[in-house]
Image: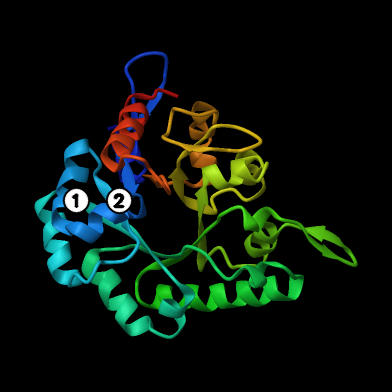
Amino acid sequence: MPGALRAAQVPFSTAPDFNTTKLDRLGLQLYTARSEMAKNVEATLEKVAAVGYREVEFAGYFNRDPVALRGTLDALKLTSPACHVGMLQVEAQWTATAAAAKALGHKWVIVASVPGKSLTSLDGLKDLAKRFNDAGARCRDAGMRFGYHNHNAEFKPVVEPTGSVLPLDVLLSETDPALVDFEMDLYWITNAGQDPLAYFTKYPGRFKLAHLKDSGGAPKHEMRDVGAGTIDWKTILRQSKRAGFQHFIVEHDEPKDVYASITASYQYLSTLEF
């Protein structure tokens, strides 16, 4: 990887011809493999590493001690830039949450979802944004970053007397970029009929992590392995720097075969030139 890109910690490498770029570091959201993690955490991580993934994003630690779990990651040459938690863990259980995150080397503590009622009024959204800012300050003081991961509910219009707004726009506008980052799930924004490129342009640099999973297209939007659907990955990935992406994390909510799914997505993305 060219030195300037490596110094910026952006996971790209420049291919030799036609000025194309490839991803050279991919992550996996372990929610994808939760059924396997429940059986054997260490064996699952070993298989994930064997596929070629170099990063993992946790969604629970499956009763493993964080320090011991970090030892497993180190032995497999895996890193874990982020974890998914609930707001309760950030607001009421912060000491334990921060200790585990530090032990595992997480840079981001990411809230994966919030109760739907928080997204249905402007007042509720502004209150949620304030809570995000408070969580961001808490993370900053602990040497980490706070982030929020979208689904499709963040794109359902909230109608107010002054007009309608999209919840994600309110959260982006009302949170402090110095305290709050976003993890864009590229499947769910597509599922909601929105254009991720428009968000990259309107809110450049706010999306530090990307979730990659594919869609079979409207109207059903069947979730598919990356490369087996209709999402234009080349166009999206070309705008990675504008978006702010530093980490690219594969996910599939309900894979029929966990290892076949994560292998298919890895093979497609690791060879994709854009």
| Residue 11 location (% of width, % of height) | 34, 40
Q: Above or below — where is 193 with respect to 90?
A: above
**Secondary structure found at label 2:** helix
Q: Residue at x 64, y 57 (%)?
A: 154
Q: Residue at x 54, y 41 (%)?
A: 242
Q: Amino acid at mark 2?
A: Ala
Discs 2, 1 touching: Cβ within 8 Å:
yes
Dot 1 crowding, Cα within 10 Å, few <14, some 14–19, many 20+: some
| Residue 163 location (% of width, % of height) | 87, 60
Q: Quadrant of the C terminus?
A: top left
Q: Residue at x 29, y 70 (%)?
A: 101
Dot 2 crowding, Cα within 10 Å, few <14, some 14–19, many 20+: many
Q: Quadrant of residue 269?
A: top left
Q: Quadrant of residue 140?
A: bottom left
Q: Residue furthest left?
A: 75
Residue 141 is labelled as none
Depth check: 229 or 244 in front?
A: 229
CA–CA distance in space, label 2 to label 1: 8 Å
In the figure, is residue 30 to the left or right of 207?
left
| Residue 31 location (% of width, % of height) | 36, 55
**Secondary structure found at label 1:** helix
Q: Which residue is mark 2?
A: 33
In the figure, is residue 115 to the left or right of 258?
right
Depth check: 203 or 129 in front?
A: 129
Q: Above or below — where is 195 with respect to 87?
A: above
Q: Residue furthest front?
A: 256
Q: Quadrant of the N terminus?
A: top left
Q: Which residue is mark 1?
A: 44
Q: Point out the tag, 2 or 1, that comes first from the N-terminus.
A: 2
Q: Amino acid at mark 1?
A: Thr
Q: Residue furthest top?
A: 17
